[in-house]
Amino acid sequence: MLVYRNLTVTAYMYTHIRMKIQRPAVGKCHRCNRSTPLSLYKQDASYLLHTYHTLRAMDTLPMLFTTAVIVGGLYWFICILGSPERKGKRAIDLSGGSIDNDKVQDNYNKYWSFFKRPKEIEKTDNVPAFVDTFYNLVTDIYEWGWGQSFHFAPSLPGKSYLEATQIHEETAVDFLNVKAGDKILDVGCGVGGPMRAIASHSGANIVGITINEYQVERARMHNKKAGLDTLCEVVCGNFLEMPFDDNSFEGAYAMEATCHAPKLEDVYTEIYRVLKPGRLFVSYEWVTTEFYDANNKDHVKIVQEVERGNALPGLRHYSDISKIAKKVGFQVVKEKDFAKPPAGPWWTRLKMGRVAYWRNHVLVVILSFLGIAPKGTVDVHDMLCVTADYLTRGGEAKIFTPMHTILCRKPE
């Protein structure tokens, strides 16, 4: 407001002076001794000219101040604002993961084309590449805009989102009854947020597997920075064909990861194989609930958009999970949806973050325009914003949950 007022006064005085000056000649202002046009109104000239030069000098101050505010604001908006976890990604470092920057747009188009050919998604052989492409596109945005744990958590009274997330992760390993030194499998570990929380909480040795090479690099870097690289190991591989020996783990968990499997029995069979007899496996599953109606067009639309925005070959119904676990040989110890009361709505974080999504999207557009973020990043971020809205709608309609929990035991 001050800058606007000064500029307005300056403009008014310039106009007034110009009206006073006619047929200018050369003279000097007797106060500041500068050469300048003189008005025919001799009695006003000295005062007006002094005012003219004073205002010209004053002009530079608001201009410098305005420039400093703009530059400082851009620096804060681009370099400081953003990551909910200060050790996560910065906006100016957004990339396409293992994809070359000049190929991000093409890979986004390729990813989206899968949904134009639904039969392609159903083919087991195509899904790993489909999921790998997705995580190359979204991993940096997830880290920057969400954090290092790529999953939801129940809303807990008096707890921040970060605290609730950590409690949710620790709860998973507590189900497994592990002790320090036990070897535990993290199925679909992402960049290792849950892995580090669980290793710190339990003292167990965690081995994570992810299909995405870029996530392996990020997870190893985070593990080392956290001083947990001796407890946390990350392997690049397909959890449908894991490179581990039979009966080699004292426990296993999956944090909203097995939803990427085209057939749940395939990944459960692999987990069953590598788990030692008598040991436990816990999974947080993305499923449709008892309130989902396949004949309701709104319900179908919500589920389809959730699938498209999360690289899911198809959401399963909650009633299928225990059947599949039993089919591969597991004993079902417990089954519960952690999204139900007394837990608060898990989608609250999505709704509260709508302003942040808009702010982040503006920033992504700016960075893409400047050539800092790869071409295609805007489309990826827009896809995730739309998906967040459909996830919220699914939660509010009670037709979808990301934390249907099943605890299984491999028989002795």
Image (cartoon, grey):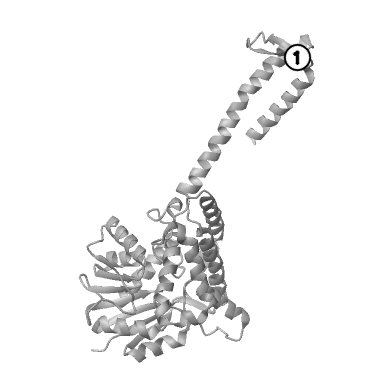
Q: Secondary structure at mark 1?
A: loop
Q: Looking at the picture, how far across and down is residue 392, in whole percent?
A: 55, 70
Q: Quadrant of the N terminus?
A: top right
Q: Quadrant of residue 19?
A: top right
Q: Quadrant of residue 303?
A: bottom right
Mark 1 residue type: Pro
Q: Pick the residue in front: 329 or 133.
A: 133
Does 58 appear above or below 50? below
Q: Looking at the picture, how far across and down is residue 340, in whole percent?
A: 48, 77
- Answer yes or no: is residue 212 visible: yes
The residue positioned 51% from the left and 78% from the top of the image is 400
Q: Quadrant of residue 197?
A: bottom left
Q: Quadrant of the C terminus?
A: bottom left
Q: Looking at the picture, how far across and down is residue 5, in whole percent?
A: 68, 32
Crowd rating for badge 1 (residues with CA inside 10 Å; few <14, some 14–19, many 20+): few
Q: Pick the residue in front: 314 or 368.
A: 368
Does 369 appear above or below 49? below
- Answer yes or no: is residue 345 visible: no
Q: Looking at the picture, how far across and down is residue 377, in whole percent?
A: 50, 59
Q: Which residue is mark 1?
A: 24
